[in-house]
Image: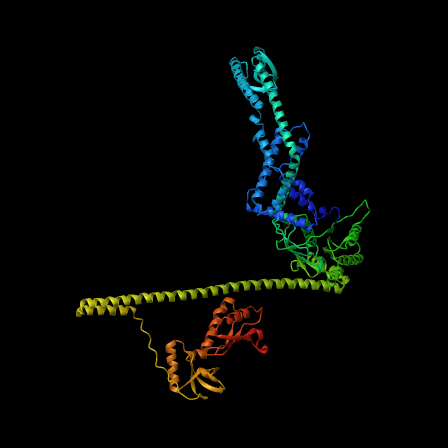
């Protein structure tokens, strides 16, 4: 049950029908467009959508499918069903072409049963073989004419006609040449036909000089068209043959019509199938033009739509070179009635009409312009109240007509109803109109109906905020530019921005102040709060976009870093393997040379010169494979025995740094390397003398090129990376931790600041992947808290 009767005109669905008809190939398809209607049958709608989706895939795949001669032959069948009648050649030609199209459609679906199962099921409507088509093809040729061999009699008649026409032409050509030679005919004349008989043109003054019959004259009367008496009998014979041909053709067509008549019931069903194919293809073509999809349909009532677009509005905007703003909407059993508020021309009515036309299209079996991941449901009833329904005949005002609709809505709306009300409550005094609208809204909420309502009334926004089943929605607005964004935001009411718009237009400040005073401070504050929320939302959306951009950039850099690391590992293994293979080759070469030398010595029986020469060759080979000279290692430092005491000099076993012991704490010692102090475990230290300490400092610096003591004096256990980019901090943190670990430190601090937490997250992700790091944690709240990461290194 839908309301009102002109519902389709109100939501402009009639325009959708017109566009669909333009996609049809014949009246077979357009008849189905006219019959298309709103359905609440879940299985039927699913099947209609599946059929259209399958045909959309056929079109997009580029597979060859018949696209012409979807002819409506029902008028021919009505004529043929009467006994004794016959169809003409051109009518049979139309039937022949459409039967060929029908046959190719059937063959296509038979060949693609698995790919298009829903369309294949339509073949159940067809119970027609190709016998009739073959019978018509035997009679009617490709040009739509009766074939010469359609019957023996016709073949003989047409052969005789050809013979007589040839004879007639010869006689006329002779007579015309003679007349032309005597100057009886016009200069540019030629043989022609008048009244179905072949004649020659003769100048009027010479018409009595040639014996014959005049059939016509020119417009000026200067030329007459004369049939010479000599060809009269031949022309008469041709006329007789023409009548005989006509009677024979009529006889053949009558027999062919008699052959067709028993097929009429099967033909009606078959062309019902052909009409459905034309209709479904039109829906698929329209879906491609509107970029429509097949959404998910659930029995649980919900609307969860993404990127919904009004198809007609999108067409109009494309012609203007503009793009439509897609709509996202979510309604469920807890939030069924959406109350949309916002400024005039902000898109409230467009949003309502978008939801209405998409829902109606869906329940008519059309693919709809929303994202394919969207979830839809079906409703039994579709109610709408938009526009001015003022009726002079019934003496109804605009407001009265709205109240009539509201009466109907409150009486018949239920859980299976979806309703749409535009500019709810307007048309009368705002105080009373708002109160009545509030009561109606609460009653509709009790019914369990779903729907979209637009309004400017503040009391309805408050009702929607306080009652389960209702939810506020706002059309977003650029407060700075005072321009609509045409974006729906569900969950908060919208401001009309009336004062701001009036101010921008240039209304006097006194008038605006007067309005503020009479509106009331509370209402002004309420609208101001909505404006502030809109500003803050825009600001945070910008910040979020920027943060996401930076996060994507960081992901790219981390990916590049990991790929580089992986490449280095692969190259390292590759070079080691190549070195091993080269060493093996050298070793094999040396072995072969030695074996060869031994063999040569044996064969020469230790000849002195030969032996000397062979020894020189071996020395040459040894020189080739001998490794490069290594830097000699210094003598090992002697460790002084005894227990480590305060004031002793010690060396760190793992990195060779030398230090002085400042204090002892159980198993740990506090040491000093220059101005830097640190705590290390005693088992990492070994005691050396004062002289050994000086020697070790110089020796270690020479050996490694890394002066640990000097490095320790210059090193700071604090790293400040604030203000750095993600790609900059990777080497800084890596080198900082490596140096700290090399110097035997236990605790490090990295200052990154709080901010959005991006630097902190990057830093800690890096630290987690370092083997030398034992743990990480936040600094004490008084010393930076989450803005500083404490790093504990492994011993």
Image location of residue 483, percent across then percent down: 66, 56
Report the side of 473 relative to 103 (left or right).
right
Image location of residue 211, percent across then percent down: 57, 11
Image location of residue 17, percent across then percent down: 67, 44
At horizontal 43% and vertical 66% (from top left) the residue drawn is 569
At horizontal 38% and vertical 80% (from top left) the residue drawn is 698
Residue 139 shows in the view: yes
Display colour scheme: rainbow
Residue 366 shows in the view: no
Which is more toward the observer, 418 or 699?
A: 418
Report the side of 514 relative to 683 (left or right).
right
Which is more toward the observer, 449 or 614?
A: 614
Say if 678 sits above or below 603 in the image: below
Which is more toward the observer, 215 or 147?
A: 147
Report the side of 558 relative to 312 (left or right).
left
Say if 738 sits above or below 41 in the image: below
- The tally of labels here is 0
At horizontal 38% and vertical 82% (from top left) the residue drawn is 696
Image location of residue 448, percent across then percent down: 74, 57
């Amino acid at each position: 049950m839908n309301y009102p009767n002109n519902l389709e005109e109100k939501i402009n669905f009639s325009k959708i029908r017109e566009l669909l008809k333009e996609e049809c190939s014949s009246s077979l398809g357009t008849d189905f467009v006219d019959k298309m209607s709103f359905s609440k049958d879940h299985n039927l709608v699913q099947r209609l959508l599946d059929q259209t989706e399958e045909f959309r895939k056929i079109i997009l795949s580029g597979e060859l499918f018949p696209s012409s001669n979807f002819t409506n032959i029902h008028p021919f069948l009505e004529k043929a069903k009467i006994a004794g009648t016959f169809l003409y050649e051109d009518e049979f030609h139309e039937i022949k072409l459409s039967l060929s199209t029908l046959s190719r459609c059937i063959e296509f679906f038979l060949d693609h049963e698995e790919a298009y199962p829903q369309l294949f099921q339509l073949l159940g409507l067809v119970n027609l073989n190709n016998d009739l088509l073959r019978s018509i093809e035997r009679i009617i040729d490709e040009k739509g004419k009766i074939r010469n061999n359609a019957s023996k009699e016709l073949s003989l008649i047409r052969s005789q006609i050809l013979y007589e026409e040839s004879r007639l032409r010869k006689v006329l050509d002779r007579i015309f040449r003679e007349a032309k030679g005597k100057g009886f005919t016009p200069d540019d004349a030629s043989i022609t036909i008048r009244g179905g008989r072949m004649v020659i043109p003769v100048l009027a003054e010479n018409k009595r000089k040639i014996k014959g019959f005049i059939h016509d004259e020119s417009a000026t009367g200067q030329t007459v068209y004369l049939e010479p008496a000599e060809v009269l009998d031949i022309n008469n014979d041709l006329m007789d043959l023409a009548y005989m041909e006509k009677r024979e053709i009529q006889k053949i067509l009558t027999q062919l019509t008699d052959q067709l008549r028993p097929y009429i019931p099967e033909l009606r069903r078959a062309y019902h199938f052909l009409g459905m194919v034309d209709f479904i293809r039109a829906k698929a073509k329209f879906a491609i033009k509107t970029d429509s999809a097949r959404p998910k349909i659930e029995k649980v009532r919900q609307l969860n739509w993404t990127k919904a677009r009004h198809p007609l509005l999108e067409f109009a905007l494309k012609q203007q070179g503009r793009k439509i703003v897609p709509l996202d909407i979510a309604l469920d059993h807890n939030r069924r009635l959406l109350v949309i508020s916002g400024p005039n021309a902000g898109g409230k009515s467009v949003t309502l009409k978008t939801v209405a036309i998409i829902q109606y299209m869906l329940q008519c079996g059309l693919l709809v312009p929303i994202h394919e991941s969207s979830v839809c449901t079906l409703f039994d009833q579709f109610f709408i109240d938009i526009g001015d329904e003022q009726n002079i005949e019934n003496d109804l005002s605009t407001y009265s007509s709205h109240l009539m609709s509201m009466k109907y809505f409150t009486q018949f709306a239920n859980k299976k109803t979806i309703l749409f009300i535009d500019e709810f409550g307007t048309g009368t005094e705002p105080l009373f109109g708002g109160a009545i609208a509030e009561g109606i809204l609460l009653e509709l909420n009790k019914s369990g109906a779903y729907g979209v309502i637009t309004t400017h009334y503040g009391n309805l926004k408050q009702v929607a905020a306080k009652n389960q089943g209702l939810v506020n929605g706002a059309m977003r607005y650029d407060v700075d530019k005072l321009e609509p964004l045409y974006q729906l935001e569900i969950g908060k009411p919208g401001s009309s921005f009336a004062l701001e718009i009036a101010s921008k237009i240039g209304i006097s400040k006194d008038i605006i102040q007067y309005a503020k005073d009479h509106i009331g401070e509370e209402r002004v504050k309420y609208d101001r709060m909505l404006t502030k929320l809109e500003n803050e939302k825009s600001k945070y959306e910008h910040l979020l976009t920027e943060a996401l951009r930076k996060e994507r950039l960081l992901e790219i850099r981390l990916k590049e870093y990991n790929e580089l690391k992986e490449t280095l590992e692969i190259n390292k293994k590759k070079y080691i393997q190549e070195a091993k293979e080269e060493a093996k080759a050298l070793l094999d070469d040396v072995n072969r040379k030695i074996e060869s030398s031994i063999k040569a010595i044996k064969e020469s029986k230790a000849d002195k010169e030969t032996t000397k020469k062979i020894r020189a060759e071996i020395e040459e080979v040894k020189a080739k494979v001998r490794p490069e000279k290594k830097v000699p290692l210094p003598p090992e430092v002697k460790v002084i025995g005894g227990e480590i005491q305060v004031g002793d000099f010690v060396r760190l076993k793992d990195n060779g740094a030398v230090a002085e012991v400042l204090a002892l704490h159980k198993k740990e010692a506090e040491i000093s390397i220059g101005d830097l102090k640190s705590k290390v475990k005693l088992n990492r230290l070994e005691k050396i003398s004062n002289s050994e300490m000086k020697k070790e400092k110089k020796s270690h610096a020479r050996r490694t090129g890394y002066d640990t003591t000097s490095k320790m004096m210059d090193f700071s256990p604090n790293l400040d990376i604030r203000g750095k980019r993600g790609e900059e901090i990777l080497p800084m943190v890596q080198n900082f931790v490596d140096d700290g670990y090399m110097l035997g430190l236990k605790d490090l601090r990295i200052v990154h600041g709080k901010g959005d937490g991006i630097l902190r997250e990057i830093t800690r992700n890096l630290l987690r992947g370092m083997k030398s790091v034992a743990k990480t944690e936040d600094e004490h709240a008084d010393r930076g808290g989450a803005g500083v990461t404490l790093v504990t290194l492994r011993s």
